[in-house]
Amino acid sequence: MDTVSVKPSPAETLTDVMARFTAYIGKRLPNDVSDKLAQLRAKETKPLAKTVYESMADNQEAAKRLNRPSCQDTGIIQYFIKAGAKFPLLGELEDILRDATLAATKAGPLRHNAVETFDEKNTGTNTGRSIPWLDWEIVPDDDGATIDVYMAGVGCTLPGAAKVLMPGEGYEGVTKFVFDVITSYGVNACPPLLVGVGVSSSAEMAARLSKKAILREVGSHNANPNAAKMETLLEDGLNEIGIGPQGLSGNSSVMGVNIENSARHPSTIGVAVSTGCWAHRRGRIRIHADLSYEILSHKDAAL
């Protein structure tokens, strides 16, 4: 009897790619984060802090060697999608990423972190109502898709906060808010942190921008020179606090501060803070129309 091979559909092919990529980023930090941690470790002068950085490096080596997640809290899965209007699987992408999350949960394996609100029941699949979380941006005249995958664990989620300031509070008020958040909760978020700051008109707009900010590469800067200057000043000021790795004191508190902003109403300043922990597990992949792909966040990555 002849054996008939069934070729996977395009949706099945992309589901497999995204499942493997999602599981992969739970085990490997992106290059920019690894490089920054190595820099902070080299500059550290306090013995306890140096020991903590060495433990972090050992942890990453063990995750790679054992092919296991580098942190037990693999978080809530979030996908940030910048898709072309002509991407051939645009209409199927939501189902694809949900199925990819299901597959990655088994393959990772990823801890079961999706609890249905009000029912207080863990689904056991990392999927649930509006989870995985999808953030959409549609690009005209493009047939590809760039997808950021982010694992939002409890530590890095805890400091998240947003507020609307009176206009008279100005950028000094933004600075105070950032410092209040990091000095109140940053020690619990597994520092050194990547701090994302959103500045907009309303709380929800600023919150979305703050999460977008921590998807940016460590060491990158806002295109606006005034915003870029504020990023540097905030980073320098937060490092002066000396929270150190895992909050045990040290030369640095943060890996960096990234600001994303929009135009705002003249009578309000919305500000929000999101943070990424030292094990900042995010990845970026570019999917082409023919479903070939490029991994942009991890050099020499193999799925």
Image: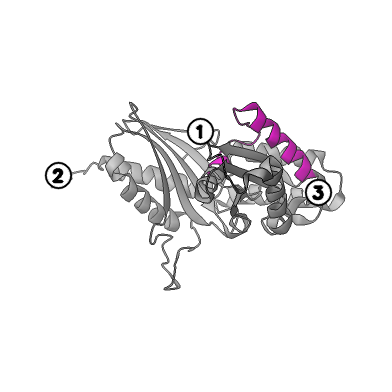
* Mark 2 Cα-neighbour bin, 10 Å: few <14, some 14–19, many ≥20: few
- Quarter location, residue 138: top left
Q: At which x and y percent is residue 76?
A: 49, 56
In the picture, the disc for residue 241 is: 3
Q: Tell me the amino acid under the disc marked 2.
A: Asp
In the image: residue 276, left or right of residue 246: left
Secondary structure at badge 1 equals: loop
The residue that appears at 32% across and 30% down in the rendered structure is: 289
The kind of residue tagged 3 is Ile
Can residue 192 be found in the magenta stretch? no
Question: Seen in the image, is 152 located left or right of residue 159?
Answer: left
Q: Quadrant of the C terminus?
A: top left
Residue extending farthest to the right is 46
SS for callout 3: helix
Can see residue 252? no
Specify whether residue 17 is in view: yes
Which residues make up the magenta segment?
212-239
- Mark 1 residue type: Leu
Alpha carbon separation for disc pair 2 and 1 = 42 Å
Q: Earlier in the sequence, mark 2 or mark 1?
A: 2
**Label 3 crowding class (10 Å Cα cut-off): few <14, some 14-19, many 20+?**
some
Q: How many marks?
A: 3
Q: Predominant secondary structure in magenta?
A: helix
Residue drawn where x is 59% and y is 35% of the image:
217
**Marks 2 and 3, Cα distance to the nearest angstrom?**
71 Å
For the point 81% across and 53% down, the residue is 249
Q: Which mark is residue 296?
A: 1
Left or right, 41 with reference to 288: right
Q: Please give the residue where the numbered disc 2 appears in the rendered image.
A: 2
User: Is residue 8 toward the left or the right of residue 202 in the image?
Assistant: left
